Image: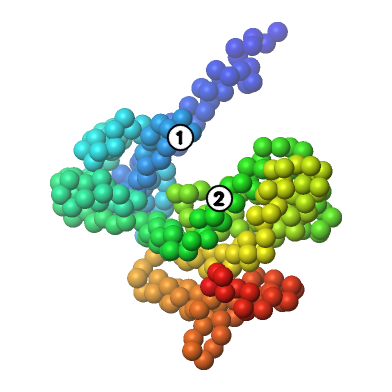
Amino acid sequence: MKASYGSYTNNNSGTEFLSSICNVIEENLFKKLDISNYWSLMIDEFNTISDDKHLAIVAKYLINNVPYMCYLGMINLEETNALYIFNQIKSFLESKNLNFDSLIHFGSDGASNMTGHRSGVSAKLKSLNPFISSNHCIAHCLHLAGKDASLKVEYFKEYEKILHKIYSYFSRSHKRQKMLHLMQDINDEPNLELQNPVETRWLLLSNVVGNLYKIIDSVLSTLNKDSLAGDKAAENLFSLLNEDFVIVTMFLADLTTILKRLINIFQSDYVSLSHLKPHLKTAINSISEYFIGSTDVQPTYGVILRNYMDRNNINRESLSFFY
């Protein structure tokens, strides 16, 4: 009879297997980093559900002139000041025997404790290697720009609240989710899930509205059915999903598609200023053509919004509340 402690389904054995595999992968990874002529460091702070603070550490390095990106590890943060974070990063990298002389770049989320010229983490890293360059993550900059722009449109505040309410209404009830999926089948809409907006990453709204606009009829049908059955929460939510809400959803689906393409360019392996410039110009031109127009040419209202307007005989004047 096989002993339980020696079986492959034993939790302790499984943990030992995983630990052994991780050790081999980690050893191989840090060997590659060590032989790379140059490497860069990227970090990002985040909070867990229990509000514990952590720091994710990522590196980018070259092997035979081919760039690679890899996750190095995670550090628990008891404090978030620059000196503490710097000491934690330094201790972590020293424990892996990494060479600071070949560390040439540092990327972060742009917070003052990271990028401060005198006492930020980047400044302290330059004390180890004065040739280190640093920058605020370009993709994160675009997220912040989108968030700042949205604050100038009063309706966006209400719109985001409604998105949270939609997600909350369906995510907390398996019965409601099942009814939504049934409506999707009836309306011949794709079997997509509703997603919850993330306040810290405004452009993740593209994922939320990218799904919502495709199943909006099923969402409305489900809410209408529940409200007729006496569900007050459904009745209140259904009243909020008026034509203005649907129009903004179609608009955002178009707009964030353009910006998401730009984000993907920013996050590609090979990025240069000459490479970025035409993509930036294309994004600006697309937004201008779709939603701004000129003195001689009216905006085209994108692809998704335009199709919705044509299907429902909505004229340009109906959009004035938003534009």
3D distance between C-alphas at marks 1 and 2: 23 Å
Q: Report whether residue 140 is seen.
A: yes
Foreground residue among 264 and 98: 264
* Residue receiving disc 1: 48
- What residue is shown at x 51% (from left), y 22% (from top)? 16
Mark 1 belongs to which amino acid?
Thr
Point out residue 32 in the picture as x, y percentages from the top left corner.
36, 45
- What residue is shown at x 67% (from left), y 57% (from top)? 241
- What residue is shown at x 48% (from left), y 49% (from top)? 199
Tell which residue pokes out farthest to the bottom in this image: 296
Picture disc at residue 178: none
Picture disc at residue 161: 2
Graded by Cα atoms within 10 Å as few (under 14), some (14 to 19) or many (20 or more), the crowding at tag 1 reads few
Point out residue 56 in the picture as x, y percentages from the top left corner.
39, 41
Point out residue 80 in the picture as x, y percentages from the top left corner.
29, 37
Question: With 43 as the anchor, is 225 left or right in this view?
Answer: right
Foreground residue among 193 and 32: 193
Q: Secondary structure at mark 1?
A: loop
